[in-house]
Image: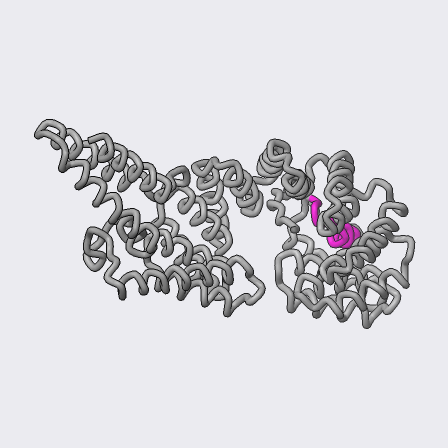
Amino acid sequence: MRYIWPLLAAACLLTAAPASAQSNVSAEICAAADDAANSPEQRIAACTDAIAAAKDAPAEASAALTSRGSAYWYINKMAQAFSDLDRAVALDPKNARAFRERAIAYRTSGRLDRALADANEAVRLDANDAKNFDVRGNVFNNNRQYDRAIEDYNEAVRLDPKFSLAFMDRGVARYFTADYENAIKDYDKAIELDPKRARAFTNRGAAYKKLGRHDRALDDESAAIRLDPLVPEYFGNRGLSYQDNGDYDRAIADFNEAIRLSPRANFLTNRGDAYQHKGETDRAIDDYDRALKLNPGFSLAYNNRGAAYGRKGDLERAIADYEQAVRIDPQLDSAAENLAMARQKRDRRNEATADNRLPTFDCATAKRAVEKAICSDPDLIRLDRQIDDAYKSALAHRDSAGVARLRREQRAFNARRDERFGRPDYQLKRELERRLLALRGMAARN
């Protein structure tokens, strides 16, 4: 990801510089790298002057057009970028950098075939430039041709052993081949060469996470945020690490920041997951709703919203969401499995209703989430009725004081059930089974 650097105040000059000096300054600013002090707008203006000055020198004009096209790409003005890079190639078909920059533009536009053709041409024209191999490696990476990508990154670091970006990019390819140990070594080298490369830290954190080294992952993700606190993905990545560790409040804080920086469907879905883990099902559903407004084709949001509705006992809406998730992404196995389970639970509930096997309360008027959950599961219905039978049996053999005491205990059990249902550490079926055993024990002792 490229970043826009702030404008610097220019010193006032008391006398005008000679035309030749101005031309040299324009050419120097035009050729500046992305991380130079000059803003993209300054570079574009300088390149425009350099292009005008080089109207009778095709090679110089091509070089200036390449730099201006790169600056336009940097600020996501893709039409202008392609226009300049096409002109640069036409003016000087031997301009390897023009082909390389156009390959980058094609790659970020998703036109990988065109990107590969240009990257190949850049390598053919200048096989001694490590950047050409790195760019072609990135195209192979996007095509999931990881072995070929690694071959190009190998050549890039051979040509330039201090090329931090190539080490980081090779780490990405190794990560995707599940070679996490060597990916970490590449990220180590990238960070050694460029300690301010924030993306190398967050990528290394992802590799550490795959190896189960969650503390190291959090350290790296925090380092990436310190280096560049304006990248929402860094907060999203750390939020996922906190969530994996069960630290849902800190996860939500990071997702909040990611959403503030860039409200995206995946950040909202991740925050919804954290709320769902905390048992705050309605807040989770609100986040999934917002995610789907931003991206109606986001299958994971449908799947996870289906799970939330299932927890609330609303099987019909859960099934509808699972079905939509599977329609969007037939390869989403978790959605297919959830759909099958929800349909089975609905069928069992319907069978129980048809046989008049109902809980001890009216499901039609049930408002509590725990009651809706019981209504949706025949096993929970059975436990609810068995608890009621055991409770009545235990009451029948007690004196007035014992009856009052048992009623208080039962009310307390129901209150705890209502309060704790939905928490990650509360298992409703297990607690009902425990209460049933306790009540049956009381009845048997009388």
Q: Which residues are magenta?
A: 22-36
Point 35% across, 43% down: residue = 428
Q: Is residue 238 left or right of residue 441?
A: right
Point 48% across, 37% down: residue = 246
- Viewport quadrant of the C terminus: top left
Above/below status of 266 relative to 119? above
Nearest the viewer among 276 and 227 is 276
Q: How is the image coloured?
A: one colour
Q: Is residue 35 magenta?
A: yes
Residue 103: % across, % down: 76, 63
Residue 69: % across, % down: 71, 62
* Residue 280 in which image quadrant: top left
Nearest the viewer among 301 and 43 is 301
Nearest the viewer among 427 and 436 is 436
Secondary structure, magenta segment, majority class: helix
Q: Residue furthest top?
A: 401
Nearest the viewer among 196 and 408 is 408
